[in-house]
């Protein structure tokens, strides 16, 4: 059996157990039996159960980021590129929903500092990829916010993560990073691009020609009443 196959089998076994039970209820002996490897083999790839847990949670992350980068080179429209990226991100979180709920508790535990830092680094990596997409949206006039790109990307990532983990169901196996499965709620992207304001309110604040006309009419009406 190839070494990479063994690692994948261990992660797949751990993922099945972490989806079904709590972190403290699972032992490495159980993971080894389910993966059909010796317990010592697990230590060839993972330092301990916490390391296995976090690497299982992030399995597929690099693949997802790779798909986002690949789409960036395909000359897609801004909205299509954004839609594909948000589908991949949403599926990644939704597929790991039980594990990420456990992470919230485990990140507060002893010895979690290294893993916390690694996850924050991956979050920054994903934020930068989304910021690059949003930047392309700004370049073609699809995004007009004056906020920095990284701030906008953090907002978008936060909405996608919350929607997938708190309100979404589970996607089918193998969907993370491939743009398949349930995908992102279109309402999240729509809300990100247009906000909660009505059409006239949004256009007026953005200073578009239509918004300027509304503003001029309002000022003229006020001036007329004063006279």
Image: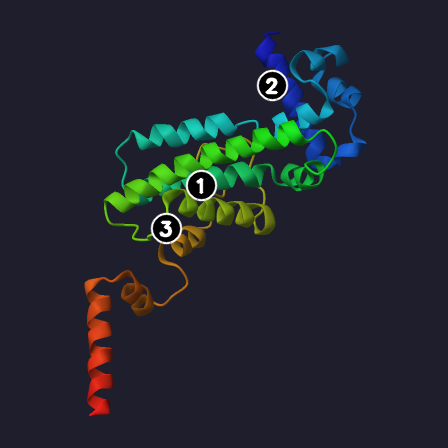
Q: Residues within 10 Å of mark 2 (few under 14, many from 20)?
A: some
Q: Is residue 56 left or right of residue 180?
A: right
Considering every residue shown, the one lying at the far bottom of the view is 227
Q: CA distance from mark 1 to mark 2?
A: 24 Å
Residue topped by disc 3: 147
> Considering only order in the chain, which callout, 2 or 3, is on the residue closer to the N terminus?
2
Circle nearer the viewer, 3 or 2? 3
Q: Quadrant of the C terminus?
A: bottom left
Which of the two residues, 131 or 20, is positioned nearer the viewer here?
Answer: 131
Mark 1 near mark 2, Cβ–Cβ under 8 Å? no
> Considering only order in the chain, which callout, 2 or 1, is on the residue closer to the N terminus?
2
Circle nearer the viewer, 3 or 1? 3
> Considering only order in the chain, which callout, 1 or 3, is on the residue closer to the N terminus?
1
Q: Is residue 171 left or right of residue 213?
A: right
Which of the two residues, 215 or 36, is positioned nearer the viewer here?
Answer: 215
Q: Which mark is residue 8?
A: 2
Q: Is residue 88 above or below residue 46?
A: below
- Return the x and y of residue 84 as percentages of the image width and height: 39, 39
């Amino acid at each position: 059996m190839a070494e990479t196959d063994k690692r994948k089998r261990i992660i797949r076994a751990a993922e099945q157990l972490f989806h079904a039970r709590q972190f403290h209820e699972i032992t490495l002996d159980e993971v080894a039996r389910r993966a059909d490897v010796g317990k010592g083999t697990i230590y060839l790839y993972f330092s301990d159960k916490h390391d296995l847990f976090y690497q299982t949670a992030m399995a597929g992350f690099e693949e997802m980021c790779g798909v986002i980068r690949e789409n960036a080179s395909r000359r897609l429209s801004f909205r299509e590129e954004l839609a594909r990226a948000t589908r991949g991100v949403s599926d990644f979180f939704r597929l790991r929903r039980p594990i990420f709920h456990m992470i919230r508790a485990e990140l507060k535990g002893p010895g979690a500092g290294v893993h916390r830092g690694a996850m924050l680094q991956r979050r920054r990596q994903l934020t930068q990829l989304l910021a690059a997409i949003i930047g392309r949206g700004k370049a073609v006039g699809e995004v007009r916010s004056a906020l920095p790109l990284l701030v906008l990307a953090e907002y978008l990532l936060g909405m996608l993560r919350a929607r997938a983990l708190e309100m979404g169901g589970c996607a089918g196996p193998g969907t993370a990073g491939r743009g398949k499965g349930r995908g992102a709620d279109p309402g999240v992207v729509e809300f990100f691009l247009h906000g909660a304001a009505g059409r006239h309110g949004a256009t007026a604040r953005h200073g578009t020609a239509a918004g300027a006309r509304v503003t001029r009419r309002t000022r003229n009406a006020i001036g007329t009443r004063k006279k």
